[in-house]
Amino acid sequence: MKLWNKIHLSVNGALAFTLTIAGTTSARGQSPAAVPAPSGQAINLNLGQTVQESLRVSFDVEQANRNAALSAQRVNETVAGSRPSIVGTASASRFDAATRIPFGSGQPVEVLPDHLETATLTAAYRLDFLGQVRAATDQARLQALTDRILVNQVSNVRALNAKTSYYATLRADHQVQVAEAALRNAQVQRDTAKK
């Protein structure tokens, strides 16, 4: 007789996956956990795989990673503000034929053909006399560091929760096995007493 115990691990109330403990034992003497596969069959997971699966489906870890990536981009943007910049512009105006402009009844004015070209190239380097760019860069770097630490903290909490659930399920499975053995023992004693 196989008993199946199920534990639902909630991921911020939005997603969930089921750890199923079978009555079988692995080579290390622990029952492997299983996550339902898309085809409906259960896949056996050990403790490490259970933690990886928990981290993979965790919305908190995903959000923390996204915030860390955004902070890294902000660092790049603030560092780019202190780098030299080169800006170029160009314009051209050309009048192909002479233009005649009449003024009332008087003689018309003739504008000669004109060709005008301008090009501007500007190189600029922002001088940080008051330290504002450096302060913004330092603040962005500290925020990025904070977000990376938060990713580690959220991942560690999620891994701890997965391990706790895994071991609680193993403990419950072993308690069921002990209860089944006690039941069989009591049935054997009852049968022996009836003889």
Image (cartoon, rainbow, N blue to C red):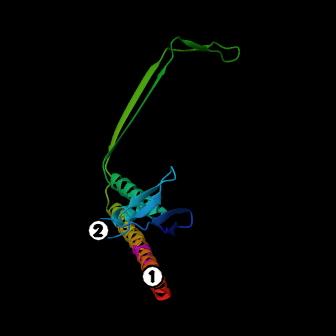
Q: Is residue 37 left or right of residue 49?
A: right
Crowding at dot 2, Cα within 10 Å, few <14 / some 14-19 / many 20+, comes out as few
Give the residue at x 39% y 67%: 155
Residue 168 within the magenta-colored segment of the rendering: yes
What residue is disc 1 on?
188
Q: Residue furthest left?
A: 28
Which residue in the protein does label 2 denote?
28
- Residue at figure coordinates x 50%, y 12% from the top left: 96
Q: Element type at marker 1? A: helix
Query: What segment is highlighted magenta in the picture?
Result: 167-172
Q: Position of residue 14 (x, y in %)?
A: 56, 63
Residue at the bottom extreme, as displayed: 193
C-alpha gap between disc 2 and disc 1: 30 Å
Q: Residue furthest front?
A: 195
Depth check: 3 or 95 in front?
3
The secondary structure that most of the magenta stretch takes on is helix
Q: Position of residue 35 (x, y in %)?
A: 46, 60
Question: How many discs appear?
Answer: 2
Amino acid type indicated by mark 1: Val
Q: Is residue 130 visible in the rendered structure shown here? A: no
